[in-house]
Amino acid sequence: MSRSDEGIEAIGLRRQFKDVEAVAGIDLRVLPGEIYGFLGPNGAGKSTTVHMLTTLLPPSGGRATVAGFDVAKQGSQVRAAIGAALQEAALDPFLTGAEHLRLQASLHGIRGDERKRLIGRLLDRVGLTSAGNRKVRAYSGGMKRRLDLALALIHDPSILFLDEPTTGLDPQSRTALWDEVGRLARDEGVTVFLTTQYLEEADVLADRVGIIDHGRIVAEGTPSQLKAQIGKPTVEVVPESPDELERLRELLRRFGAETAARPGAFAVQLDGHGALPEVVRALDTENLRAAQINLHEPSLDDVFLAKTGRTLEGAEEE
Ligand SMILES: Nc1ncnc2c1ncn2[C@@H]1O[C@H](COP(=O)(O)OP(=O)(O)OP(=O)(O)O)[C@@H](O)[C@H]1O
Ligand SMILES: [Mg+2]
């Protein structure tokens, strides 16, 4: 079910800042009612893309349509169709949540009883009913992100842009926000374009994921398609004696290519010449004792590693 016949389309979209090519020509298509996860590390070009798609920043090249309107030429039609919760939220610490919503509603020409009902409904939807009359300076990070979401929903947009909506949130607030975004897409047919640095967020929430790095989309597909491209699981073995690491390395290399492992362990990505049972048998035959054997199924981070040579987990910790 969807309310807009058109989702989002970008063709060769580019943005240059002096000598930095923040977005280096991206093509993407988000179908109506779909949740699209734009996954990438710091500085990848996620916010710049969102700013162009929400008409806040003119593209340096290429083109994009949102809800069927050209972002460069039909800005006001695009803005009428979309809601956006940006990364640098512009909340006033001295206003309450309800006051923010009242202002935003008035900007959209919603007044009187209709406005009152709408504010009550939105506060309830994002779980801020009891905090609605508190000033924003007393809100936690999670409460601010939820207020952002309510503000983005005020004019009932058919397309929603969320720029890193859960960065810095505790796991509970994160899950609550995922639930609400999932519900909006599923029950109300809202198209969602969401940026994130979190693998799990893209994996759990997005119907389709685009991985962006240095302004370029390096992989795109459903989370399971992307993981299936990698296909093979990784086996990591910690030898009982650290002296055996060299012998372990020789043995494991017969099963696949070396991949990142924790200190004191060795890991390979299984290349199809045998699975875990064969590895265990070989360890046994060669009398090489393992303190631990771990099997990792491929994750979106493996996809990121395969495409960029770096891991996203590492970038996240910065
Ligand atoms: N207004 C600007 N002027 C100059 N350079 C900019 C500007 N905005 C972004 N950049 C540069 O463009 C690149 C992409 O930045 P962008 O904010 O789009 O990344 P991001 O993926 O949103 O990162 P993060 O996860 O940290 O929010 C970076 O190298 C950044 O320094
Ligand atoms: Mg950003």
Image (cartoon, helix red, strand yellow):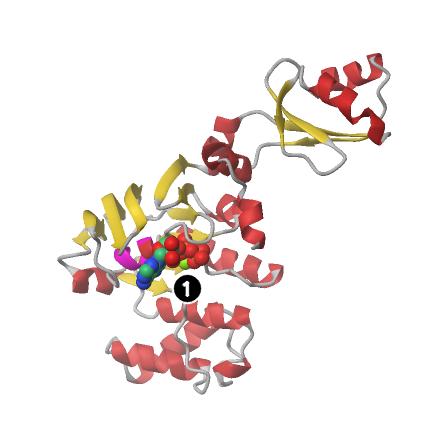
What residue sits 13% from the left and 57% below the top?
73
* Quadrant in the picture for the C terminus: bottom right
* Residue 310 seen by the camera: yes
* Residue 188 seen by the camera: no
- For numbered disc 1, what is the local secondary structure? loop
Q: Badge 1: how crowded within 10 Å, few (<14), some, or many (20+)?
A: some
* Label 1 residue near ligand 2, CB within 8 Å: yes
Q: Name above or below for residue 287 compared with residue 313.
A: above
The image quadrant of residue 154 is bottom left
Q: Main secondary structure of the magenta part?
A: helix
Residue 50 part of the magenta-drawn span: yes
Number of numbered discs on residues: 1
- Nearer to us in this view, 158 or 267: 267
- Nearer to us in this view, 97 or 314: 314
List x then y, in percent, for residue 303: 50, 35
- Say what amino acid the circle numbered 1 marks: Gln
List x then y, in percent, for residue 242: 83, 31
7 left or right of 41 in image: left
List x then y, in percent, for residue 57: 25, 61
Q: Name above or below for residue 87 compared with residue 41.
A: below
Q: Name above or below for residue 25 compared with residue 73.
A: above
Q: Name above or below for residue 306 compared with residue 19.
A: above
Residue 66 part of the magenta-drawn span: no
10 left or right of 271 in image: left
The quadrant of the picture showing ligand 1 is bottom left
Q: Which residues are the magenta region? A: 49-53
- The residue singled out by tag 1 in the image is 87
229 left or right of 1 in image: right
What residue sits 54% from the left and 78% below the top?
139
207 left or right of 174 in image: left
What residue sits 48% from the left and 47% below the top?
202
List x then y, in percent, for residue 264: 77, 35
